[in-house]
Image: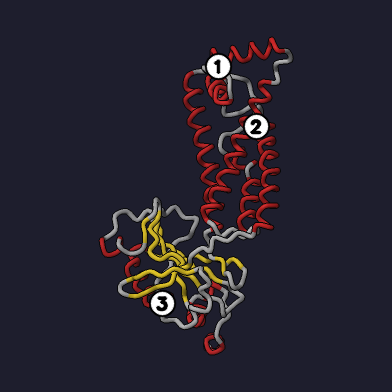
């Protein structure tokens, strides 16, 4: 039976990183983040991130006049920041999803707000004398109502134009430019902050096998949404052979919005390591009471099982039934496959 406290091998690997839940009268084990961080790695990587982030802000500033295409250019230039967030969490072995999410979101906000601060400083540098500085301040107050960074942001939206080809001949500013400026810049900020939140929180939320000192790898399968009740029953019963018979559908690049995802987290090169199973659905709408009561509903997804512990003894069955996982297959299964 999957993830139960009756498994004699579970006690040897719990190490404070499991939690128990009662499901239909059965006690099940689920992965729980240890909250540990490899600080000797994390701190140097954080310092590196604090160097890379303002450099990326400077690159975005260089693109401001002639190459600033909304959404595309900020996302492109933020790739190095995304990379250091990934390294910060993965190489820094951050097993605190809250810390990872905060760090990722903060670095992306520093990147974008840093760009606006640099742009503001460049605007102020036009004044070569104290008298000119006073004139700039007066101009900002008159146009935007204040002379700080927020005032500069308002000034930009009230005076600049939005053109499909930056750097080309300028058109006259109108009220729609200001409205769309607030919308587009606001959406950029939300998207970038959300990406940082997703990378930091998502990567640090993966399974880390403390006794192996390694992150587990993930493999996802899409299943038909109408099979959710059967899939939940099969997972709870540990019937991996039955689960493998559920047909898989679609592709992750498809436009289908309603998804049922089966996720395995494991070490493909270690047949003795435990496996963790997650089942979640996206955009499921209103579920029947018997399904809605399973697991936990989030903002966008419903987690029926989140990182359910599977005993190493079951890895042989899973290896045979899900060859895509790359687990070492038991000899008898490999022999029968070869003879077939």
Q: Secondary structure at mark 3?
A: loop
> CB under 8 Å between callouts 2 and 1?
no
Q: Position of residue 98 (x, y in %)?
A: 51, 53
Q: Nearer the viewer, mark 1 or mark 3?
A: 3
From what the image shows, is residue 202 above or below residue 325? above
Q: Which residue is mark 2?
A: 67
The quarter of the picture where residue 73 lies is top right
Residue at position x 58%, y 80% from top? 328
| Crowding near the residue tagged with mark 3, few <14, some 14–19, many ≥20 C-alpha atoms within 10 Å | many
Sequence-wise, the earlier of marks 2 and 1 is: 2
Rounded to the nearest whole Å, what is the CA distance between mark 1 and mark 3? 69 Å
Q: Which residue is mark 3?
A: 4
Q: Secondary structure at mark 1?
A: loop
> CB under 8 Å between callouts 3 and 2?
no
From what the image shows, is residue 130 above or below residue 177? above
From what the image shows, is residue 119 above or below residue 96? above
Q: Secondary structure at mark 2?
A: loop
Q: For the view shown, which residue lies furthest in the right direction? A: 128
Front in this rendered view, residue 168 or 6: 6
Q: Which residue is mark 1?
A: 172
- Left or right: 312 in relation to 298: right
């Amino acid at each position: 039976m999957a993830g139960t406290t009756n498994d004699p091998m579970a006690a040897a690997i719990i190490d404070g990183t499991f939690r128990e839940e009662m499901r239909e009268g059965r006690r099940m084990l689920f992965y729980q983040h240890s909250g540990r961080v490899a600080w000797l790695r994390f701190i140097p990587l954080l310092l590196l991130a604090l160097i890379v982030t303002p450099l990326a802000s400077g690159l975005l500033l260089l693109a401001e006049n002639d190459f600033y295409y909304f959404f595309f250019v900020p996302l492109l230039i933020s790739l190095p920041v995304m990379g250091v967030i990934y390294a910060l969490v993965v190489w820094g072995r951050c097993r605190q999803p809250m810390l990872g999410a905060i760090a990722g979101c903060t670095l992306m906000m520093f990147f974008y707000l840093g760009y606006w601060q640099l742009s503001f400083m460049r605007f102020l540098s036009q004044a070569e004398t104290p008298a000119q500085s006073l004139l700039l301040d007066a101009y900002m107050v008159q146009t935007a109502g204040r002379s700080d960074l927020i005032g500069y942001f308002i000034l930009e939206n009230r005076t600049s134009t939005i053109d499909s080809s930056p750097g080309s001949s300028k058109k006259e500013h109108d009220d729609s430019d200001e409205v769309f400026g607030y919308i587009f810049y606001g959406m950029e900020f939300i998207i970038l902050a959300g990406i940082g939140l997703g990378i930091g929180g998502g990567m640090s939320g993966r399974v880390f096998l403390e006794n192996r000192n390694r992150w587990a790898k993930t493999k996802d399968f899409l299943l038909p949404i109408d099979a959710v009740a059967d899939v939940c029953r099969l997972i709870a019963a540990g019937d991996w052979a039955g689960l493998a018979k559920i047909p898989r559908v679609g592709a992750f690049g498809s436009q289908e919005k309603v998804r049922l995802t089966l996720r395995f987290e494991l070490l493909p090169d270690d047949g003795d390591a435990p496996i963790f199973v997650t089942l979640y659905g996206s955009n499921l709408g209103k579920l029947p009471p018997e399904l809605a009561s399973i697991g936990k509903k989030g903002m966008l997804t419903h987690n029926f099982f989140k990182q359910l512990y599977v005993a190493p003894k079951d890895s042989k069955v899973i290896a045979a039934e899900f060859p895509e996982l790359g687990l070492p297959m038991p000899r008898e299964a490999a022999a029968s496959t070869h003879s077939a």
